[in-house]
């Protein structure tokens, strides 16, 4: 899936919930390692009719760009002998999150520490909208920089 420049926080699946025995784990590729973010076990009990359910899982951290996931069929309980029948079926997945902050628009958003309406460094707010700790400007017009007063 692709989040683009948006920040994804959760992933949701519409999946088939079958009879007792259907269960799966959900993994996301995080920093080069497949990390388990959730488990699902059938809730439809002994009802032979399979039903569609929607389940949402939190991502391990805020993520952008390409997000790879996998669903792996599992046994629902220790010693459960149904290894030939497990299944994972889904018909859509959706990412949830919010747009990435836009540095330079004058609105402090997301991970921005400041946003002074431009993307110039050296004015107290850097080009990446992080506070510049050692900033001096000529506040009194004497030709010498004065420490930024907070």
Image: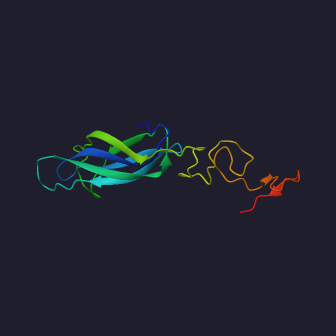
Task: Please tell me which residue is depicted at 88% across the width and 53% down the height of the picture.
Answer: 144
Name of the residue lying farthest toward the left: 48
Q: Is residue 52 visible?
A: yes
**Quick one: quadrant of the N terminus?**
top left
- For the point 40% across and 42% down, the residue is 69
Front residue of 123 and 91: 123
Residue 141 percent coordinates (x, y): 85, 53
Residue 21 relative to residue 29: left or right: left
Q: Please state if 89 lies on the left or on the right of 136 as rendered.
A: left
Q: For residue 90, what is the image quadrant? A: top left
Which image quadrant for residue 140?
A: bottom right
Relative to residue 149, is residue 2 depicted above or below?
above
Q: From the viewer's side, name the closer residue of 127 and 70.
A: 127
Q: Which of the pair 96/71 is nearer the observer?
A: 96
How many labels were placed on the picture? 0
- The reply to whether residue 23 is in sight is no
Residue lying furthest front in this view? 141
Which quarter of the figure is the C terminus placed in?
A: bottom right
Residue 136 horizontal/vertical position (percent): 80, 53
Coloration of the structure image: rainbow
Q: Position of residue 24 (x, y in %)?
A: 30, 49
Q: Is residue 108 left or right of residue 72?
A: right
Observer-nearest residue: 25 or 114? 114
Residue at left offset 62%, top offset 45%: 117
Q: Where does the image place residue 131, in percent across and percent down from the top left?
A: 68, 54
Q: Residue at x 59, y 51 (%)?
A: 112
**On the rendered structure, is 114 left or right of 77?**
right
């Amino acid at each position: 899936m692709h989040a683009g420049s948006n920040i994804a926080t959760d992933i949701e699946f519409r999946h088939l919930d079958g009879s007792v025995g259907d269960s799966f784990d959900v993994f996301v590729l995080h920093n080069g390692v497949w990390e388990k973010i959730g488990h699902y076990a059938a809730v439809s009990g002994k009802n032979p009719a399979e039903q569609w359910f929607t389940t949402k899982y939190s991502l391990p951290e805020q993520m952008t760009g390409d997000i790879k996931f996998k669903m792996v069929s599992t046994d629902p309980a220790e010693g459960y002998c149904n290894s030939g029948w497990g299944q994972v079926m889904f018909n859509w997945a959706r990412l949830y999150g919010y747009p990435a902050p836009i540095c330079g628009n004058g609105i402090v958003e997301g991970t921005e520490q400041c946003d002074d309406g431009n993307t110039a460094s050296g004015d107290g707010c850097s080009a990446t909208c992080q506070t510049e700790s050692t900033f001096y400007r000529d506040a009194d017009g004497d030709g010498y920089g004065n420490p930024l007063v907070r």
